[in-house]
Amino acid sequence: MKRTHLLVLAALLVACGDKTPPPVDTPSYNVDASRITVSGVSSGAMMATQMHVAHSALIGGAAMISGGPYYCAEGALTKGLGPCMKGGDLGLPGLTEYSRKASDAGAIDDVANLAGDPVWLFLGARDAVMHRDVTNAAAMFYLEMTGEAPIVVLDVPATHGFPTVDTGVPCDEMTTPFLNACGYDAAGQLLAALYGELQPAGVASSPLVEVPQPGADDATMLPNALAYVPAACRSGTACGVHVAFHGCQQSTAFVNDAFAADAGYNEWAESNGLIVLYPQVDSSKIAPMNPMGCWDWWGYTDENYATKGGAQIGVVKAMLDALAGKAL
């Protein structure tokens, strides 16, 4: 690949072995490893596609709200803030080439695992932060990698945030907690796209619980994630896991549990046998500079951020293992 910052393949292999967080004491459940999916909004959407591509042998589908293609920034903040948000030439052939080379090197799972995976993409019609070119590039990336055309939703009059039925601020306001009451159930729509026909949403009567994030300090993450565990899953029923990545300024440090409690995932999880894991990234006003608490999709943790050796990807994978009580 002609880009000079492409990781040296041998270094990628070494890095994957160096970033495995230690085990943690987390209650374990009867996790159905065939039903693990991811989603996210904004920087969380970028993190969701990184998690999906890096661990495609485990992650069976992905949904992104205001996101872009895998490895879009290519390790450069200037590209991240430029074409990866404002549109233009994203160099899509280079991104797919990088993915295949990283796959060949073992830095990410075999990209052949992506074949047939369901993908759901959303961009609000009033989103002034993310350009349609970026969502279209994500669709083209996944079309090539999965062999299936992703579902793309572009006609909901939402701004840059997570659309809900009736929780959060008005649909056209981009402000904390970045949940937008648009009369649109994004959580239900994306879960149905990833899992197929769902049972009607239930009542989220279980409390949110804290889950330790192993290796959080080295990954610029908060000590604990949140999780919603339905009653049936706590009783030993085999349950899938959906990982939902918050956006910038949307972690518990900024909005408490608003994203985890009110985005709408938990009601569907309760009636459809899904544990929902809400990982939490920290903010930082010194190196690495990340004052808005965004997920690393441009390389502020290190150059391996989009691979299995990435610090944040490693923490999330360790939490999934802990929830299952075994290495998945």
Image (tube, grey):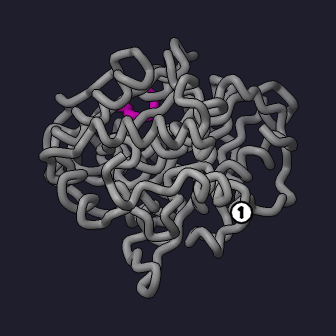
- Report x, y in % for residue 80: 28, 59
Point 40% across, 79% down: residue: 289
Point 72% across, 56% down: residue: 17
Which of 307 and 46 lies nearest the eye of the viewer? Answer: 307
Q: Is residue 55 visible?
A: yes
- Report x, y in % for residue 195: 55, 20
- For badge 1, the amino acid type reads Asp
Point 39% across, 66% down: residue: 249
* Callout count: 1
Magenta region: which residues? 185-189
Q: Is residue 242 above or below residue 321?
A: above
- Report x, y in % for residue 86: 15, 53
Which of 301 and 93 lies nearest the eye of the viewer? Answer: 93
Magenta stretch: residue 140 in it? no
Q: How many residues crowd mark 1 within 10 Å: few (<14), some (14–19), many (20+)?
A: few
- Report x, y in % for residue 182: 26, 39
Q: Main secondary structure of the magenta part?
A: helix
Side (left or right) of 69 relative to 283? left
Please state, as top left, top right, bottom left or bottom right, where the C terminus lies in the image. Answer: top right
Which of 82 and 220 lies nearest the eye of the viewer? Answer: 82
Side (left or right) of 26 relative to 168? right
Side (left or right) of 323 relative to 175? right
The residue under label 1 is: 18
